[in-house]
Image (cartoon, rainbow, N blue to C red):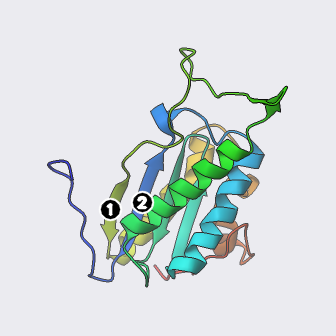
Amino acid sequence: MPTGLQRYYGKGDLHFVTFSCYRRLPLLASERARNLFVKELARVRTEYGFRLAGYVVMLNHVHLLMSEPKKGTPSTVMQMLKQRVSRKMRKRTKRISGQREFQFDEDGLELKSFWQERFYDFNVYKRGRIKEKLNYMHANPVIRGLVEHPHNWPWSSWSSYMKGERGLVEIDPVEF
């Protein structure tokens, strides 16, 4: 593990996790890509047994507010989630004349990865911090200019908290 990076597991805290697409490219820009991501998030959540308190899927990064899983650690969950999404995205890349159409970055170089290698993890144990992180996540699509109001971005947990509706991924609401 690189110097300076410490993870604090085993205390029962929620974890505010952020991870980005390779070189912060908008690899989740299509609805298809974001829908695939939330589908895999739901599967990994069931398999590893963690509570999902909040989420938002952006064009080039993702935020999750999650508990520690029953199986493994948040690091294990991130590894599985990122692997499954990147593999499925590669499988779904269109083929032309039987050959794969490769994805390229803005410099015309073939992409070697779908995700950045690391993820940011912040332990959340105070109620005020839970609300802060949820508000931050839900405002993200508005701040980035993708929508005018969070209710217009279905790839987040906003509707679960504000309207009591089930979103694309079921969440475990927390009190704050």
In x, y percent, where is residue 175?
A: 49, 83
- Tell me if residue 107 can be seen: yes
Q: Secondary structure at mark 1?
A: strand
Q: Is residue 94 left or right of residue 64?
A: right
Q: Which residue is mark 1?
A: 122
Q: Nearer the viewer, residue 84 or 162?
A: 84
Amino acid at the residue labelled 1: Phe
Outermost residue to the right: 97
Q: Residue furthest front?
A: 98
Height in image: 71 above or below 131? below
Displayed quadrant of residue 170: bottom right
Pointer 1 local density, CA inside 10 Å: few below 14, some 14–19, many at least 20 = some
Residue extending furthest toward the top: 107
Q: Residue at x 73, y 38 (%)?
A: 93
> Where is residue 153 drawn, in percent x and y?
71, 53
Query: Residue placed at 60% from the left, 46% from the top?
Result: 58
Residue 152: percent from the left, percent from the top?
A: 75, 53
Mark 2 crowd level (few <14, some 14–19, many ≥20, 10 Å Cα): some
Dot 2 or dot 1, earlier in sequence: 2
Q: Amino acid at mark 2?
A: Val
Residue, disc 2: 17
Query: Looking at the image, do the residues carrying marks 2 and 1 touch, with CB atoms under 8 Å apart?
Result: yes
Answer yes or no: is residue 149 visible. no
